[in-house]
Amino acid sequence: MFKNKNYRTEISKGIPSLYPRLWRYCLALTSNPDQANDLAQSACLRAIEKADQFEMGTHLDRWLFKIAQRLWINELRSAAVRRGGGLITIDELKLPDTTNSNQETNLFARQKVMELPEAQRVTVMLVYVEGFSYQEACEILDIPIGTVMSRLATSRRKLASSLEDYKGKVKQ
């Protein structure tokens, strides 16, 4: 019991500094700020509840991201069952469109990242925004490192193409 209390204290102390990053990751998962808030808060609560499962000396951020990812997958499955559809692919989800074509170039890039398929979007956020290594990303996502590399390569091609198109339109 004493050990669990120490873990909860350490996790509770670490969450505030990690929360902005966790929220960004949740936004990448959900594509919706309100859902991102709910998911980030749920991940924090789950982390505190499951404090005894955290290995002290490891990376709290990776653990929180993994918790958020699992909660999101469970939410998608639950929503599909509630609608009577069972499991569905991410392509079939009707996520809200959060894009706005009147943004500056940096917002345009963010918009294009958010338009990527969920698997690519989440991988881009982990590696390029959060700074995780390929190996760390594959551990968080529970996928092979080759899949991480493939998702990133595909994302870079899509984003580069979109940026070239955008720059061409701006120059006209």
Image (spheres, grey):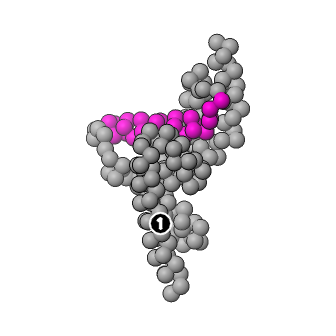
Is 15 on the left-hand or right-hand side of 66?
right
Q: Which residues are magenta?
A: 57-82
Please tell me whether residue 126 is drawn above or below residue 4 in the rendered image.
below
The residue at the far left in this view is: 85
**Is disc 1 surrounded by few (<14), some (14 to 19) or many (20+) residues within 10 Å?**
some
The answer to whether residue 55 is above or below residue 74 is: above
At 66% from the left and 41% from the top, the residue drawn is 18
Residue 10 lies in what quarter of the image? top right
Q: How many marks?
A: 1
Q: Is residue 25 visible?
A: yes
User: What residue is at 45 percent from the left and 49 percent from the top?
Assistant: 148
Q: Position of residue 27 (x, y in %)?
A: 53, 49
Where's residue 75, x and y in %? 42, 38
Report the residue marked by disc 1. Answer: 159
Q: Is residue 75 magenta?
A: yes
* Residue 48 pos. (x, y %): 61, 27
Q: Which x, y percent locates residue 23?
A: 59, 46
Left or right of 136? Residue 6 is right
Front position in the image: 90 or 102:
90
Numbered disc 1: secondary structure: helix
Please name whichever residue, 29 or 42, is drawn nearer the observer in this view of the structure.
29
Residue 37 colored in magenta in the image: no
Can you say which quadrant of the picture contains the N terminus?
top right
